[in-house]
Image (spheres, coloured by chain):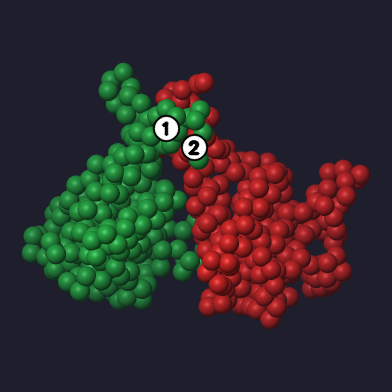
Amino acid sequence: MGDSQYSFSLTTFSPSGKLVQIEHALQAVGSGQTSLGIKAANGVVVATEKKLPSILVDETSVQKIQLMTPNIGVVYSGMGPDSRVLVRKSRKQAQQYFRLYKEAIPVTQLVRETAAVMQEFTQSGGVRPFGVSLLIAGYDDNGPQLYQVDPSGSYFSWKASAMGKNVSNAKTFLEKRYTEDMELEDAIHTAILTLKEGFEGQISGKNIEIGIISADRKFRVLSSSEIDDYLAEVE
Amino acid sequence: MSRGTGAGYDRHITIFSPEGRLYQVEYAFKAVKAAGVTSIGVRGKDSVCVVTQKKVPDKLLDQTSVTHLFPITKYLGLLATGITADARSLVSQARNEAAEFRFKWGYEMPVDVLSKWIADKAQVYTQHAYMRPLGVASMVLGIDEEKGPQLFKCDPAGHFFGHKATSAGLKEQEAINFLEKKMKNDPAFSYDETVQTAISALQSVLQEDFKATEIEVGVVTEKDPVFRVLSTEEIDEHLTAISERD
């Protein structure tokens, strides 16, 4: 697979030393729906807008927040189809790690391998970079962790981060509200308030998605009624 | 061999434009519309119906060989809107995939799994320069063992969603507006209502009354979960029912 006629990289340096395709990929991320993550003292929460193109779409058929392993979840901003590829590859890598070491893959390792895939697509022949940034949330022996991976393949650990359309407002809001000793429940409320800031229209359990992981090390996506309950608390 | 460094090649292969768009994918969407045909799908309480125009451009053509409705397995149907040649290629691969699934796992491939497979394939074409995206929007229908009637739509960008009702092709937006009004209060359509909503949506949007030979209709029902293409007599019954209702 892969035409030999395209065995040259499509992502090449511009005269000023920039990798323009990666910058364009970041633009694609920046025009995607807002998503964010917050690391609390006893867990991590990730949240995203779930705006669907029409009321005819069955919202129960769509889940943007996905599991990579039972204790690691991921949310994206940018091109949905690209995120599916990364989720699939990461799940396989996590499984291969387990088969070899008989131990659940640590969050940092999975992030590293996912980022390596994204970097490959900025250098391999005949492919374009991924048009997504990922927020990977997990809980392992090193406690709760939150990482953001960009189309270039670079990744950092964050206390709280946001991506997508409303990124600058969301990050300013998070900077004000974040505290080191935040509990998971506070973090969920803060996440909802942050999403609400830039939200166009009426926010409800049907047009946002929230995923959480706490010390029980089981990542789960909240149901829309649970989200509605949190929204009522926040009012 | 031209090198795609982004300077003007973002329109020729699927690399990013400066605004972060994929022009080739957007052009693939235009190709779906350029086929000049509109398709509609509606999901009812216990059935799913898809309808499309049957345009036979030449009287010398064998009408029976012109079709956009393809059975993938006995239980899954696919309505392809857009470039017919691309559709046939996709259908051929989908049939193979569904058969392998049944062999490997011992149960029929569900609707959403097939849709995801089609969408993931479409995504590959948006990321690898050596293959262009397919100019096809696929509507997949079937009865899911656990979730009941299912209607999914997959597009050239690799998106796929489940739908209560949807449309693809030339008059896609007008049809979606029409369907949004009809489905606003989450009606639970019976089999007849499902078929007639789909057909009358097409008639309304194209502003013409059809003869039974000018449209193709495919259905699955919970009672008989086999994918079936309606005969011209059955289509006629529904058309008559619609005109009497109005």
In the image as oriented, which residue stretches furthest toward the top? A15
In the image as oriented, which residue stretches furthest toward the left? A181
Q: Is residue B189 left or right of residue A187?
A: right
Q: Residue at x 32, y 61 (%)?
A: A95
| Residue B178, above or below A7 | below
Q: Position of residue B99 (x, y in %)?
A: 61, 63
Residue tagged by mark 1? A125
Q: Residue at x 31, y 39 (%)?
A: A119
Q: CA distance from mark 2 to mark 1?
A: 8 Å
Q: Colour of chain A?
A: green
Q: Which mark is residue A225?
A: none
Instruction: Classify mark 2: residues with Cα within 10 Å, few (<14), some (14-19) or many (20+).
Output: few
Q: Position of residue B56 (x, y in %)?
A: 83, 48
Q: Residue at x 17, y 52 (%)?
A: A158
The count of marks equals 2
Q: Earlier in the sequence, mark 2 or mark 1?
A: 2
Residue tagged by mark 2? A2
Q: Is residue A132 left or right of residue A101?
A: right
Instruction: Tell which subunit mark 2 falls on.
Output: A
Cβ–Cβ below 8 Å for labels 2 and 1?
yes
Amino acid found under the numbered disc labelled 2: Gly
Q: Tell me the red chain.
A: B
Amino acid found under the numbered disc labelled 1: Gly
Q: Position of residue A20 (x, y in %)?
A: 35, 29
